[in-house]
Amino acid sequence: MGAVGEIILVFRDMVNMLFTVYIYIIIARAILSWVNPDPYNPIVRFLHNATDPVLNRIRRVVPLQFSGIDFSPLILLFGIYLLQRVVMVLLTRLALGL
């Protein structure tokens, strides 16, 4: 494997880290939904701004709410995990093929 393959592996690790950080942001957002946080708190606003666009799209397509529990973060986590695995495999194969 040459220098280009190594660069692709570093890029793969950076993409993996971004996926992981977004997963933690979704988890924090889901935990905040259980309490009544201050909507003007900068952290709460960041979590809402980072997750609401994707969660709202999921809620429009699959309105999963049972007994007041919103399952859209769980669907998003499954989707991100699946996308993360596919991207990691593709980038690894690309790097090893060079």
Image (spheres, grey):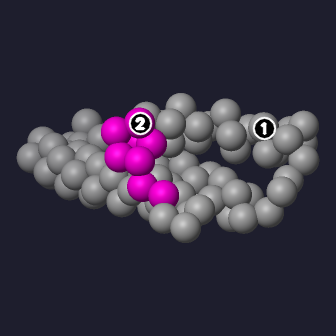
Tell me if mark 2 has few (under 14), some (14-19) or many (20+) residues whose alpha carbon lies within 10 angstroms of its own: few
- Residues in magenta, as a range: 58-65
Residue nearest the observer in this picture, 54 or 87: 54
Percent position of residue 72, x then y: 46, 53
Quadrant, the C terminus: top left
Residue 3 colored magenta? no
Q: Which mark is residue 60?
A: 2
Tell me if mark 1 has few (under 14), some (14-19) or many (20+) residues whose alpha carbon lies within 10 angstroms of its own: few
Quadrant in which residue 5 is drawn: top left
Relative placement, left or right, of 54 versus 1 is right
Residue found at x 41% / y 36%: 60
Residue found at x 9% / y 46%: 97
Disc tally is: 2
Query: In this picture, is 56 found above or below 95?
Result: above
Percent position of residue 30, x then y: 63, 59
Relative placement, left or right, of 58 versus 49 is left
Q: Earlier in the sequence, mark 1 or mark 2?
A: 1
Residue nearest the observer in this picture, 47 or 66: 66
Residue 61 colored magenta? yes
Which secondary structure, mark 1?
Answer: helix
Q: Are discs 1 and 2 less than 8 Å apart at CB? A: no
Q: Which mark is residue 45?
A: 1
Percent position of residue 76, x then y: 42, 52
Q: Amino acid at mark 2?
A: Arg
Q: Amino acid at mark 1?
A: Arg
Relative placement, left or right, of 80 versus 17 is left
Look at discs 1 and 2 and give the one toward the viewer: 2
Judge whether residue 34 can be spotted in this image.
yes
Residue found at x 70% / y 57%: 33
Residue found at x 14% / y 51%: 93
The CA distance from mark 1 to mark 2 is 22 Å
